[in-house]
């Protein structure tokens, strides 16, 4: 994992910030006519697609919301946060993360679902902020080379299993806090299924992109030319207070790192050339 562990570990914490504490409540497994690199690369960092691909799902308010037509994600974007694409270059990992302080107020998220559910998340948020007082909190999702991804719906992980050149078998795992009351667990589980998985509103959008991109890539003209991954090239910088390299959110630094690592695997004559990594 290298520096990616810094970003992955918080995703395994309980809602109140305690280490570990999650239950796996289920897994979706499905196949789709896409090369596995498309979803793996997308979850590695592809902020540019969201405003077009997922516009209809945002309008439909797929998630917990304070007001009709105003999803929690859109509401929380009003808070002043630093947002970056973070790259663990030598290992091919990366993702999108926002940085914020532990003194930000709770944003009401679940009141239209249930006051009990919103009270639970409010209390858990308060305890989490107390645990990390004075620290920088990092939130987001990432891609771990080669085929493990987090992000999208909260508390979900996915593995993209190659099932042939033009087929992927996806395994998406769903988690909830062990200590959450039943009503809060059910609310999170329902939100996760509306968002992600084979019939999730947002993942259905993504699959349409991946499936058609796979088919188009096998065309006569497409096979003549390489894909262009120059966005943000040369603008990466060391993060400083957090591990890795930082880029603007709409960048392809993660994709370049991912395919650079993939190329090393394809060209290395043996495993000793791959590990340990040389400085």
Image (cartoon, rainbow, N blue to C red):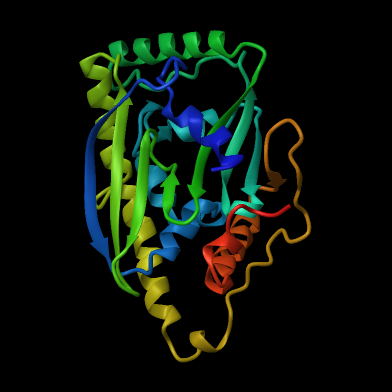
Residue 271 in the image: above or below residue 250 = below
Residue 270 in the image: above or below residue 150 = below
Whole-percent x, y for residue 56 in the image: 39, 50
> Residue 14 lies in what quarter of the image?
top left
Q: Is residue 130 left or right of residue 218?
A: right
> Residue 194 lies in what quarter of the image?
top left
Q: Residue at x 78, y 59 (%)?
A: 234
Q: Residue at x 45, y 31 (%)?
A: 11
Number of callouts in the render?
Answer: 0
> Residue 154 lies in what quarter of the image?
top left
Q: Residue at x 50, y 35 (%)?
A: 8
Q: Is residue 260 left or right of residue 140?
A: right
Of 94 and 84, nearer the camera is 94
Q: Residue at x 57, y 43 (%)?
A: 96
Of 55 and 47, nearer the camera is 47
Whole-percent x, y for residue 151 in the image: 44, 42
Residue 23 in the image: above or below residue 96 = above
């Amino acid at each position: 994992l290298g520096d990616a562990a810094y970003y992955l570990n918080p995703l395994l914490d309980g809602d109140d910030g305690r280490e570990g504490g999650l239950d796996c409540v289920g897994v979706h497994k499905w196949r789709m006519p896409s090369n596995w690199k498309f979803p793996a690369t997308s979850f590695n960092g592809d902020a540019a697609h969201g405003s077009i691909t997922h516009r209809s799902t945002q309008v439909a308010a797929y998630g917990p919301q304070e007001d009709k037509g105003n999803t929690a994600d859109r509401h929380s974007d009003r808070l002043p946060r630093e947002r970056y694409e973070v790259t663990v270059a030598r290992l091919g990992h990366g993702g999108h993360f926002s940085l914020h302080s532990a003194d930000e107020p709770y944003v009401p998220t679940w009141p239209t679902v249930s006051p009990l559910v919103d009270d639970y998340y409010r209390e858990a948020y308060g305890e989490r902020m107390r645990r990390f007082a004075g620290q920088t909190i990092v939130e987001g999702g990432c891609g771990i080379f080669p085929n493990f991804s987090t992000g999208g719906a909260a508390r979900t992980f996915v593995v993209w299993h190659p099932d042939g050149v033009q087929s992927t078998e996806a395994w998406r795992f769903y988690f909830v806090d062990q200590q959450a009351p039943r009503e809060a667990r059910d609310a999170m589980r329902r939100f996760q299924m509306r968002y992600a998985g084979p019939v999730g509103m947002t993942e259905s959008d993504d699959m349409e992109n991946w499936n058609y991109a796979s088919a188009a890539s096998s065309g006569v003209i497409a096979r003549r030319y390489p894909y262009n991954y120059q966005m943000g090239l040369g603008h990466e910088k060391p993060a400083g207070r957090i591990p890795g390299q930082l880029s603007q959110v709409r960048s392809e630094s993660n994709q370049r790192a991912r395919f650079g690592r993939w190329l090393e695997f394809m060209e290395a004559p043996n495993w000793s050339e791959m590990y340990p990594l040389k400085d």
